[in-house]
């Protein structure tokens, strides 16, 4: 099982590294040096699904940057980081969120770190993030692992309401865009 997970992580890292635009995004985010910071959601997920379908990388609607700073949960600080990223790459629509305060919006107990916050996201495959380490390597975070993502699954997270998951699948039209995906209910 460990070898399978490592193979999935290598695949994801390779797909991101082959995408110059995604590498620029990772570099811009890394330049902020935010604590426990990752570029997640569609940034990783869509690239993998595109690859599984033989598509060129789909344009990103937005770029989700998640970090955890319990010492400064003020939403205004996240907005300032978003402005900094917008100045660096104005063609990107940035969404920067400090996960230290997101539990309030989502009605949960406080999260302990970014991985904990991501473990409440409605789909397991959305809860995968990447960051650029100081040595240039890509590091991944995936509270549910990466196997379901690289297998082309779209998995309901039982920590959230099923109706929310189904609403997102319909609204985002993932199955229309990536028809080989398999919806999974654990």
Image: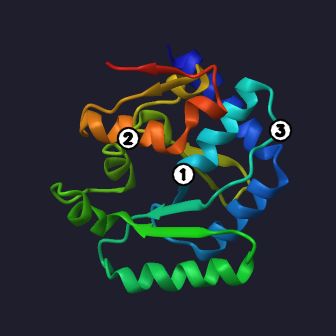
Q: Nearer the viewer, mark 2 or mark 3?
A: 2
Q: Disc 2 and disc 1: Cα gap in Å?
A: 20 Å
17 versus 2 height, above or below: below
The residue at which mark 3 appears reads as 56
Of mark 2 and mark 1, the one earlier in the sequence is 1
Q: Nearer the viewer, mark 2 or mark 1?
A: 2
Which class describes the residues within 10 Å of circle 2: few (<14), some (14-19), or many (20+)?
A: few
Q: Disc 3 and disc 1: Cα gap in Å?
A: 19 Å
Report the number of numbered marks: 3
Q: Measuring from the top left, give residue 165's x and y in whole percent.
A: 36, 37
Which class describes the residues within 10 Å of circle 3: few (<14), some (14-19), or many (20+)?
A: few
Asked whether 131 or 107 is in front, the reply is 107
Q: Residue at x 81, y 48 (%)?
A: 19
Which SS class for mark 2?
Answer: helix
Q: Residue at x 52, y 68 (%)?
A: 95
Of mark 2 and mark 3, the one earlier in the sequence is 3
Which SS class for mark 3?
Answer: loop
Compared across the picture, whether 135 is left or right of 55 comes to left
Q: Measuring from the top left, give residue 176's x and y in whole percent.
A: 61, 31
Asked whether 80 or 4 is in front, the reply is 80
Q: Residue at x 83, y 38 (%)?
A: 56
The residue at which mark 1 appears reads as 40
Q: Disc 2 and disc 3: Cα gap in Å?
A: 27 Å
The residue at which mark 2 appears reads as 167
Q: Measuring from the top left, give residue 144's x and y in whole percent.
A: 41, 32
């Amino acid at each position: 099982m460990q070898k399978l997970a490592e193979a999935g992580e290598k695949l994801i890292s390779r797909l991101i590294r082959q995408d110059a635009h995604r590498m620029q995004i990772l570099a811009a985010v890394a330049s902020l040096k935010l604590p426990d910071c990752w570029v997640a959601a569609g940034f990783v997920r869509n690239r993998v699904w595109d690859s599984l379908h033989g598509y060129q990388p789909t344009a990103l609607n937005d770029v989700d940057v998640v970090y955890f700073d319990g010492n400064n949960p003020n939403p205004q600080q996240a907005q300032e980081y978003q402005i900094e990223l917008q100045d660096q790459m104005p063609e990107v629509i940035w969404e920067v969120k400090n996960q230290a305060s997101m539990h309030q919006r989502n009605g949960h107990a406080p999260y302990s770190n970014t991985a904990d916050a991501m473990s409440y996201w409605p789909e397991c495959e959305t809860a995968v993030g990447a960051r650029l380490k100081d040595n240039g390597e890509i590091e991944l975070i995936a509270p549910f692992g990466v196997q379901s993502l690289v297998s082309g699954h779209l998995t309901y997270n039982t920590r959230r309401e099923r109706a929310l998951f189904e609403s997102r699948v319909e609204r985002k039209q993932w199955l229309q865009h990536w028809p080989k995906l398999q919806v999974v209910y654990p």
